[in-house]
Amino acid sequence: MQTELAMGQGAGTLYDKIWDSHVVRSYADGTDLLYIDRHLVQEVSSPQAFAGLQARGLPLRRPDAHLAVADHAVPTLHRDRPLREGLAARQVARLQQNARHFGIPYIPMHDRRHGIVHVIGPELGFTLPGATLVCGDSHTCTHGAFGALAFGIGASECESVFATQTLRQRRQKRMRIRLTGSLPRGVTVKDVVLALIARIGIAGGAGHTIEYAGPAVEALSMEGRMTLCNMAIEAGSRVALIAPDERTLDWLRGRPLAPQGDRWAAAVADWRRLRSDPDAAFDREVDMDISDLAPQVSWGTTPEDCAPVTGHVPDPAAVSDPVRRRRMEQSLAYMGLVPGTPLRDIRIDRVFIGSCTNARLEDLRRAAQVVRGRRAAPHVRAIVVPGSAAVRLAAEAEGIDHVFREAGFEWRDSGCSMCVAMNDDRLAEGERCASTSNRNFEGRQGKGGRTHLMSPEMAAAAALAGRLTDVRDWA
């Protein structure tokens, strides 16, 4: 899988270095044919791609470069029962059949390696620095936390990767976001990325690959870096990157699918060169000091509709741009909110702690610290869905499941769960949810459901209060 990096001459960005090392052919229209090292396959985007292969009588070029797992449609309760007949059951069965037919490694939902693709990829060492990695899911940018050039693709592109192990792509512009300062008390990387998107907008990174840099990024754990990269797509960017460092290497060392022995030493020597040159040119630069941030919550129906929890629901009448004003009015109508309402007065019905953004062990540990020795409000139904079976087992070994259960939370099996409402976990119409997921579009968590994005600690505190609240009041 490893491709030796072609450094070339002159200064270059991390993005350009990985891109250049994977170019198979360049075309007159400015596009390049890229070699794709690894492909994560799930049940939603793959059926059409597999069907295309079979219709054309094409073999799958490199079965070992793919890894299949069902995560969107799987239930998080009653795994011991057969899946109820319906679309979800058909999607899971079809993925298993296709993986078997084409010889792709498949992880069933009862396996100890099961989980959300963007959680298990790094856990297994399938995600590696300097690799090109794709998946039929927009949050594939998560894997950029390890210095992988990772991005989501559509069904026809999945078919191309199956058949040729290549994709024809156009190089993007480069954007560097430098984070400085230290996280204040009660503030997490989820608050940072929500505040960033509120600042630059949901199209702020459109057409650009984002490279996160700066001392605040270097100080983040790998879990924090994955959260940061995961939501780059919510700022309009398909790709996010963080240069690998010693923290990255320590996290990957010994992972089942990572290089071992002499191959590990050779890979590390290669990975240490994966960083932008000091004089590399970026098309856009954004600097953000995180020292004065407060915990963030979303109030509208896009991730840029966020504000400090100490604030109020904004008034569209105060906005001069008629397009923006109209969109705000529509958002507030859907969310059932009145301008001027203190965010901390908004009552909630549900809490969801999970998703490929915030369902790793570090996230669950921090949320458990908030609820330890306390009880969720009687009217709130709260669920905790670990991002993988490995996370669930590690959390149970630490007693984290007992902390949540004693606080009145439901403890579930791994999967995408309520993030995407393609399974049994969803909001009823009009229900309001404090969610650690990444999207708050209309109907995202269920038809008519209302989503407020926030950190795991903030969601845990909301469960206790029965409304949006400032986690710093619960410390």
Image: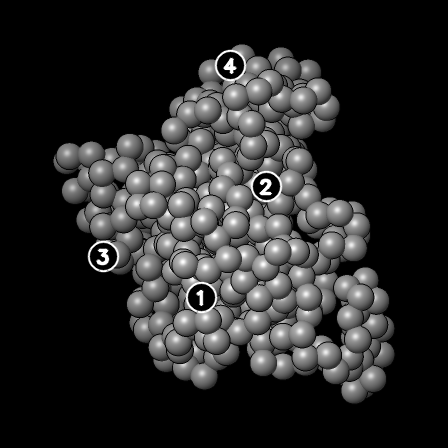
Q: Amino acid at mark 4?
A: Arg
The numbered mark, 1 or 4, whose residue comes first in the sequence reads 4
Q: Nearer the viewer, mark 3 or mark 1?
A: 1
Determine whether label 2 and label 4 are within 8 Å by CB: no
Which residue lies under the disc numbered 2? 417
Determine whether label 3 and label 2 are within 8 Å by CB: no
Q: Amino acid at mark 3?
A: Glu
Q: Nearer the viewer, residue 67 or 243?
A: 67
Cα distance, mark 4 to mark 3?
38 Å
Which residue lies under the disc numbered 3? 246
Who's the residue at 23% across and 50% down the image?
250
Cα distance, mark 3 to mark 2?
33 Å
Which residue lies under the disc numbered 1? 189
Q: Quadrant of residue 156?
A: top right
The numbered mark, 3 or 2, whose residue comes first in the sequence reads 3
Who's the residue at 72% across and 62% down the image?
301
Who's the residue at 68% across and 66% down the image?
347
Give the number of the disc on residue 149.
none
Residue count near mark 3 (Cα–Cα under 10 Å), binned few <14, some 14–19, many ≥20: few
Cα distance, mark 2 to mark 4?
25 Å
Residue count near mark 2 (Cα–Cα under 10 Å), binned few <14, some 14–19, many ≥20: many
The numbered mark, 2 or 4, whose residue comes first in the sequence reads 4
Which residue lies under the disc numbered 4? 100
Q: Nearer the viewer, mark 3 or mark 2?
A: 2
